[in-house]
């Protein structure tokens, strides 16, 4: 309805007519009789016209001016102050705390007796005060299969983050995250070689437990170099422990989102808030950060802290004597090595420094490659969407140059009762 139509509303026109006739000299009783209203109604609008010369005689809104469920200005100021408090990180208890709505709600419960506002209300207040960052909407892409992480230690994702301390000394930090519980373990080193990666994994398995699947990106420290059909030291270590290996798509770090989220939190709450001058100081502060991360911190899209998410689960941790009694050269053991690859426009995928043709009909789609060391064969699978049956596209002979040995019994027993985390 336009403004002109609203101003000429029937009631507004009637009030305007009453005032006009009264000011023309017609008695109020006569105007009331003509318009079928009382004299008090005539005098009301005449008096209102004298007080508001520019009125259009429209009825005021009857909406309630008081909203009992509306957030008070005092509560809104509290939310902004808590956000500013968390951003400063001055208190030891808030040394690594995040600054999102969940942390503000938790700090409110700690400080004030009144019930805390909901997460959506806190988010609206932060947005109103320009204290949030709008993330860009992700673009649509083809379906990418993921391993199942339905229990603690089903899948461990490992990544490396590089930083420099004052003086130019480099720090290579290896971060491993349990995808189910978001529990994490982190170690810092001077280099990112395969030997250092194995040392990190052995320490992680002693702390978090032995996983069913170890997920890596395509760093040379994990993949094993540039020679075709060669399994690197990290892959051999995982197979020796009875752990399946999964390599994520090349150049797609978002596939590794749990560990990338941890990397961002680590860089923001640990590296960004501490001025470190010696590499040995990194490990000391890192232990404090991990203690905070496991207990009070709740990761995004997680119902509880990592520590509570793992309560009651049967975890198989690696003993220290088992970590130190490994053979000097690890053999290739019976197991499976997986990779998720995007098919190139030419219809090919690359795995273990070898190219395999899949077909142009699968261009820009994702396929699942599985190397079965026991049978010395590589199988390529395709799944159109989550929950759909797998389709085997191709089987290729894998010419491994070494004999394949069985997994030691003490490690094979760890995985006997576990549910499979990888389908193909």
Image (spheres, rainbow, N blue to C red):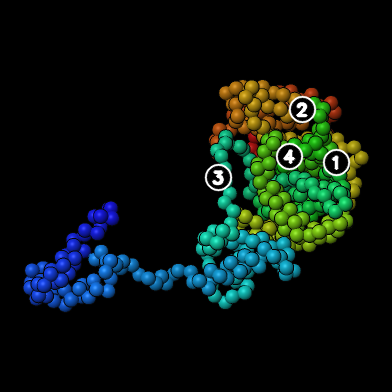
Q: Residues within 10 Å of mark 1 (few under 14, many from 20)?
A: some
- Residue ID at (68%, 58%): 306
Are the residues tagged 1 and 2 within 8 Å (C-beta)? no
Residue 22 position in % (x across, y down): 14, 71
Residue, disc 2: 353
Residue, disc 1: 193
Are the residues tagged 4 and 3 within 8 Å (C-beta)? no
Label disc, if present, on residue 306 of the rendered structure:
none
Are the residues tagged 1 and 4 within 8 Å (C-beta)? no
Q: Residues within 10 Å of mark 3 (few under 14, many from 20)?
A: few
Between disc 2 and disc 3, whose residue precedes?
A: 3
Residue 414 position in % (x across, y down): 76, 47
Q: In terms of image quadrants, where is residue 158?
A: top right
Q: CA distance from mark 1 to mark 2?
A: 19 Å
Q: Secondary structure at mark 4?
A: loop
Between disc 1 and disc 4, whose residue precedes?
A: 1
Out of 362 and 28, give the one closest to the viewer: 28
Residue, disc 4: 217
Q: Secondary structure at mark 2?
A: loop
């Amino acid at each position: 309805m336009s403004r002109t139509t609203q101003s000429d509303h029937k009631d507004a026109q009637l009030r305007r007519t009453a005032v006009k006739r009264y000011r023309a000299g017609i008695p109020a009783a006569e105007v009331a009789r003509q318009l079928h209203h009382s004299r008090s109604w005539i005098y009301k609008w005449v008096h209102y016209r004298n007080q508001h010369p520019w009125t259009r005689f429209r009825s005021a809104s009857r909406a309630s001016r008081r909203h009992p469920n509306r957030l008070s200005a005092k509560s809104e100021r509290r939310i902004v102050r808590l956000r500013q408090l968390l951003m400063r990180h001055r208190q030891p208890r808030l040394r690594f705390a995040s600054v999102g709505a969940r942390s503000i709600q938790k700090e409110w419960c700690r400080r004030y007796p009144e019930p805390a506002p909901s997460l959506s209300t806190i988010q609206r207040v932060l947005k109103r005060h320009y204290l949030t960052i709008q993330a860009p909407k992700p673009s649509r892409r083809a379906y990418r299969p993921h391993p199942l992480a339905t229990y603690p230690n089903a899948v461990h994702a490992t990544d490396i983050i590089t930083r420099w301390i004052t003086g130019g000394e480099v720090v290579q930090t290896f971060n491993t995250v349990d995808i189910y519980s978001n529990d994490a373990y982190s170690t810092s080193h001077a280099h990112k070689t395969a030997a250092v990666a194995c040392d990190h994994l052995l320490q992680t398995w002693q702390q978090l437990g032995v996983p069913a699947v170890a997920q890596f990106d395509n760093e040379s420290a994990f993949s094993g170099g540039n020679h075709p059909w060669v399994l690197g030291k990290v892959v051999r270590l995982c197979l020796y422990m009875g752990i399946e290996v999964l390599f994520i798509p090349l150049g797609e770090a978002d596939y590794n989102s749990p560990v990338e989220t941890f990397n961002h939190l680590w860089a923001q709450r640990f590296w960004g808030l501490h001025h470190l001058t010696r590499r040995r100081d990194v490990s000391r502060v890192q232990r404090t950060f991990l203690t905070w991360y496991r207990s009070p911190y709740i990761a995004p899209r997680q119902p509880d802290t990592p520590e509570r998410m793992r309560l009651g689960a049967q975890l198989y941790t690696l003993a220290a004597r088992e970590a130190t009694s490994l053979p000097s050269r690890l053999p290739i053991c019976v197991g499976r090595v997986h990779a998720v690859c995007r098919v190139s426009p030419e219809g090919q995928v690359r795995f273990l420094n070898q190219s395999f043709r899949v077909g142009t009909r699968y261009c820009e789609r994702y396929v699942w490659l599985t190397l079965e060391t026991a049978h010395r064969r590589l199988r390529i699978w395709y799944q159109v969407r989550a929950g759909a049956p797998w389709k085997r596209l191709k089987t290729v002979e894998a010419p491994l140059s070494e004999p394949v040995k069985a997994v030691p019994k003490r490690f094979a027993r760890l995985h006997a009762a576990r549910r499979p985390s990888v389908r193909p």
